């Protein structure tokens, strides 16, 4: 992600919130000159409520899942089921063990480099479960000089906030030599991934896919499984993070990635390594689960001669549509269906860096899709014409399950907003609106004292650098406008990810959000629903979600270098209703504190 000047980004959080106290001036993270400062503001409690809906756990009309009825599932649950309201309970627990080691890897043949790996493989093992299963993962940290955690990207973690895997917020890191058991319920279905949230550690290999089997909005014959694409660097993430941090403070770009990997493989620029290969049978339809697990690159993918039928955005089933290219922002997922109806031959699967999204890479990614009976060898096929519309997400992401976002309280509040949105600031309208400029306030957690420790202790003296706001009232809509403020010479898109919830994308726009005209452009009836969306460079992103999951949750830019420098905010939702951690959690923190009295490597960034 190119950064030629510090990006000034603002968040307006329209909800019942409180703000922490003054941030020290010597806090060097995301911000002009590296400083971060903010002032205290209080707002009154919101009164808007989420429209009532059925929360019955009764199944929908019975049907059976199969190649011609993928909309069905089992026990009566189907693609028509809103998994935020009900889900099956299988009584089944799927168990995995992930051992984290310090080793080397060489995914494209360029040469070995230091890597952190799960079970010695890259990517890590795919975690597979059925909708309604309980997932239990034992993590053994055999790193000698680093803590670790695992975040289950996009997983709702309903009433299991302590399992979200964010050190400094929901837990202390797992110390070298320690073991942690994560347990959560698969209340959603679809495709996602897991990764370390310990600084930029996942850029050294700590990633893996998650496949939760369930219904789909279109039919197919064969599920090919997960298919990650990502940037890859020949230097370590720790080395790059230092360079990116120094460059950010002086307004320079981070280093470009060296190559792109497709399902963990590629041939290097020098021709070493190997392409990933997939076999197709003519006449069959295949489901492919695409994931962008990059640290810094937004990526476009296509399969020569084959249109892609898109059926999900992140974990949300959508009304299917066809396209030649799919843009995946960092952290996003799209499930697509490929109809093998072309001539028996070999075809290039292409992964290209999205330069129009300010991403930078020195090479490209390739894999080979071969029809059964095709002569072996590299494809000779031609790529589709590259998209020319710029860094814009597809506007046809219509959720299969229809929901309407209440607009009344938003429209009443925004019409009375007396705030200059072009100014970098932290202020409120004295009611429900908070303007938060992340270039003057950056998150910086303490691994030794997570936010949940404050909640557990009944301590409300949250450090200002935790960048914490409170959403105390459950059952209301909370609206956020994320605004990249004017003043940057080259505005940068940011993939914004929310923990603990999906959000509804009400709208995006260029320039500054206009309180008089922009609200009329927002979509309230069945808007796009997902957990990662692009904030346009120099523009704004408006989202909404209901407060229906008590916990300490992180919202952040998923560019690893940016969240490392503090481009994130956490919110404490209905803290009195959070399921608090027990003695095992306390022991994990005690072990970490003991280790951190004399660590091999100290924390040098936000910790996230």
Image (cartoon, rainbow, N blue to C red):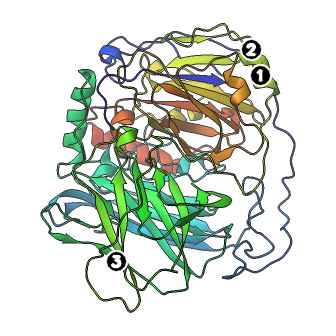
Q: Nearer the viewer, residue 504 or 40?
A: 504
Which of the 4 image quarters holds residue 125?
A: bottom left
Query: Which residue has dot 3 on it?
Result: 277
Callout 3 environment at 10 Å: few (<14), some (14 to 19), or many (20+)?
Answer: some
Q: Which element carries disc 1, helix, strand or loop?
A: helix
Query: Considering only vertical position in the picture, is 216 above or below 28?
Result: below
Q: Which element carries disc 3, helix, strand or loop?
A: strand
Query: Which residue has dot 1 on it?
Result: 411
Give the residue displayed 42% in from the left and 30% down from the top: 567
Cβ–Cβ under 8 Å for marks 2 and 1? yes
Callout 1 environment at 10 Å: few (<14), some (14 to 19), or many (20+)?
Answer: some
Left or right of 548 in this view: 109: left
Which of the 4 image quarters holds residue 37?
A: top left
Q: Nearer the viewer, residue 573 or 323?
A: 323
Left or right of 493 in this view: 319: right
Q: CA distance from mark 1 to mark 3?
A: 52 Å
Q: Earlier in the sequence, mark 1 or mark 3?
A: 3
Q: Residue 140's x, y, as percent?
A: 36, 61
Query: Considering only vertical position in the picture, is 30 above or below 590?
Result: above
Query: Which residue has dot 2 on it?
Result: 415
Give the residue displayed 36% in from the left and 25% down from the top: 490
Q: Residue 568's x, y, as percent?
A: 46, 31
Q: CA distance from mark 2 to mark 3?
A: 55 Å
Query: Dividing the image into 4 quarters, which one contains the C terminus?
Result: top left
Q: CA distance from mark 2 to mark 1?
A: 6 Å
Query: Considering only vertical position in the picture, is 67 above or below 527?
Result: below
Which residue is most to the bottom?
Answer: 373
Q: Which element carries disc 2, helix, strand or loop?
A: helix
Whether residue 135 can be seen here:
yes
Query: Considering only vertical position in the picture, is 239 above or below 47?
Result: below
Whether residue 100 can be seen here:
no
């Amino acid at each position: 992600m190119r950064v030629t000047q510090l990006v000034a980004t603002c968040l307006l959080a329209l909800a019942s919130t409180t703000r922490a106290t003054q941030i020290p001036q010597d806090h060097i993270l995301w911000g002009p000159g590296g400083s971060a400062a903010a002032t205290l503001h209080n707002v009154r409690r919101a009164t808007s409520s989420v429209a009532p809906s059925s929360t019955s756990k009764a199944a929908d009309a019975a049907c059976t899942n199969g190649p011609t009825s993928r909309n069905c599932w089992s026990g009566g649950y189907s693609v028509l089921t809103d998994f935020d309201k009900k889900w099956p309970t299988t009584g089944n627990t799927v168990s995995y063990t992930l051992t984290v080691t310090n080793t080397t890897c060489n995914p494209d043949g360029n040469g070995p480099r230091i890597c952190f790996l799960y079970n010695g493989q890259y990517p890590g093992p795919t975690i597979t479960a059925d909708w309604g299963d309980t997932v239990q993962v034992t993590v053994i940290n055999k790193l000698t000089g680093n803590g670790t955690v695992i975040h289950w990207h996009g997983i709702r973690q309903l009433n299991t906030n302590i399992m979200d895997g964010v050190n400094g917020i929901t837990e202390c890191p797992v110390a070298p030599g320690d073991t942690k058991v994560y347990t959560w319920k698969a209340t959603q279905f679809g495709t996602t991934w897991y990764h370390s949230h310990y600084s930029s550690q996942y850029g050294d290999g700590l990633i893996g896919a998650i496949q939760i089997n369930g219904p789909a909005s279109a039919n197919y014959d064969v599920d090919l499984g997960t298919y990650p694409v990502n940037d890859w660097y020949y230097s370590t993430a720790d080395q790059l993070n230092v360079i990116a941090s120094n460059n950010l403070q002086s307004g320079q770009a981070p280093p470009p990635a060296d190559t792109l990997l497709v399902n963990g493989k590629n041939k290097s620029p020098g021709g070493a390594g190997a392409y990933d290969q997939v076999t197709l049978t003519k006449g069959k339809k295949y489901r492919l689960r695409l994931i962008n697990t990059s640290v810094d690159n937004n990526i476009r993918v296509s399969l020569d001669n084959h249109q892609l039928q898109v059926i999900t955005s992140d974990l949300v089933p959508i009304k299917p549509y066809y396209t030649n290219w799919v843009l995946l922002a960092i952290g996003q997922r799209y499930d697509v269906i490929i109809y093998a109806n072309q001539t028996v031959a070999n075809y290039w699967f292409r992964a290209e860096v999205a330069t129009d999204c300010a991403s930078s890479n020195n090479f490209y990614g390739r894999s080979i899709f071969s029809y059964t009976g095709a002569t072996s060898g590299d494809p000779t096929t031609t790529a589709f014409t590259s998209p020319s519309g710029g860094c814009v997400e597809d506007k046809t992401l219509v959720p299969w399950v229809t929901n309407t976002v209440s607009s009344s309280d938003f429209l009443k509040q925004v019409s009375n907003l007396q705030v200059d949105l072009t100014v970098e600031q932290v202020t409120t309208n004295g009611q429900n609106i908070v303007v938060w400029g992340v270039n003057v306030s950056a998150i910086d957690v303490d691994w030794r004292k997570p936010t949940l420790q404050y909640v557990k202790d009944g301590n409300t003296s949250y450090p200002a650098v935790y960048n914490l706001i409170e959403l105390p009232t459950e059952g209301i809509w909370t609206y956020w406008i994320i605004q990249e403020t004017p003043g940057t010479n080259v505005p940068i898109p940011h993939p914004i990810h929310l923990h603990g919830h999906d959000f509804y994308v009400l709208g995006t726009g260029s320039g500054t959000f206009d309180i008089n005209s922009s609200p009329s452009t927002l979509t309230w009836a069945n808007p796009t629903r997902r957990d990662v969306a692009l904030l346009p460079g120099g523009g704004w992103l408006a989202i909404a979600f209901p407060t229906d999951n008590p916990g300490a949750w992180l919202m952040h830019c998923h560019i690893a270098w940016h969240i490392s420098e503090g481009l994130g905010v956490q919110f404490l939702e209905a803290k009195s209703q959070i399921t608090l951690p027990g003695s095992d959690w306390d022991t994990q923190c005690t072990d970490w504190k003991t280790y951190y009295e004399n660590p091999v490597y100290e924390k040098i960034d936000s910790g996230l």
